[in-house]
Image (cartoon, rainbow, N blue to C red):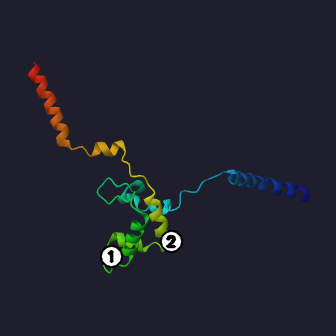
Amino acid sequence: MNRKITRLRALLWLPIALASSYVAAQTTTAPPAGRLLASNCFQCHGYDGKSSIGFERLSGESSNEIYNELREMRTKSKPDIMDMHARGYTDTQLRLLANYLSAQKTTTSKSTKTSTSSPTHESTKIKKSKKSKEDES
């Protein structure tokens, strides 16, 4: 009877042992320093600090400039939303965040370029092409 209990216990631990070895075998890479901290900024300032909705673009600015602005925001007597965000970080976290954002490239994507064209410019092109077709008729 004792032997059966020992076997049963061994069989119960087998799935746990296999699962833990599977987890240990997985390799993961950590995100760049400051990336997770900066993800809080992305809703307003855009993914990787490249705002396309009117907020200040943070990518490409110098690390010291971003860091000093964030530190300055923490000391305001009448804080706004950005000041409250800045108060939630330590100096070390602000430095990591500033370093990450300053390292981002400032090139624009094709979608950003097409979104900046004015609708009146596009409609003028269409009107001109329609007019030239009518003139040919």
Vertical placement of 119 versus 92: above or below? above
Residue 30's spot in the image, x, y percent? 58, 57
Local SS, label 1: loop
> In the rendered image, which quarter contains the N terminus?
bottom right
Q: Which of 111 and 4 is in front in this view?
A: 111
Q: Can residue 47 be spotted in the picture?
A: yes
Crowd tier of the residue under label 1, counting other residues whose Cα lies within 10 Å: few below 14, some 14–19, many 20 or above: some
- Indicate which disc, 2 or 1, sits on the residue closer to the N terminus: 1
Vertical placement of 81 versus 117: above or below? below
Vertical placement of 5 versus 130: above or below? below
Residue 34's spot in the image, x, y percent? 50, 62
Is mark 2 in CB contact (under 8 Å) with mark 1?
no
Q: Can residue 90 be spotted in the picture?
A: no
Residue 13's spot in the image, x, y percent? 78, 56
Residue 136 placement: quadrant = top left
Q: Return the residue at label 2.
A: 92
Q: Return the residue at label 1.
A: 79
Mark 2 or 1, closer to the camera: 2
Q: In the image, is 14 to the left or to the right of 124?
A: right
Residue sitting at 53 percent across and 57 percent down? 32
> In the rendered image, which quarter contains the C terminus?
top left
Q: Which amino acid does label 1 sit on?
A: Pro
Q: In the image, is 48 to the left or to the right of 81?
A: right
Residue 17's spot in the image, x, y percent? 76, 55
Residue sitting at 36 percent across and 72 percent down? 83
Local SS, label 2: helix
Crowd tier of the residue under label 2, counting other residues whose Cα lies within 10 Å: few below 14, some 14–19, many 20 or above: few
Q: Which amino acid does label 2 sit on?
A: Thr
Q: In the image, is 2 to the left or to the right of 104?
A: right
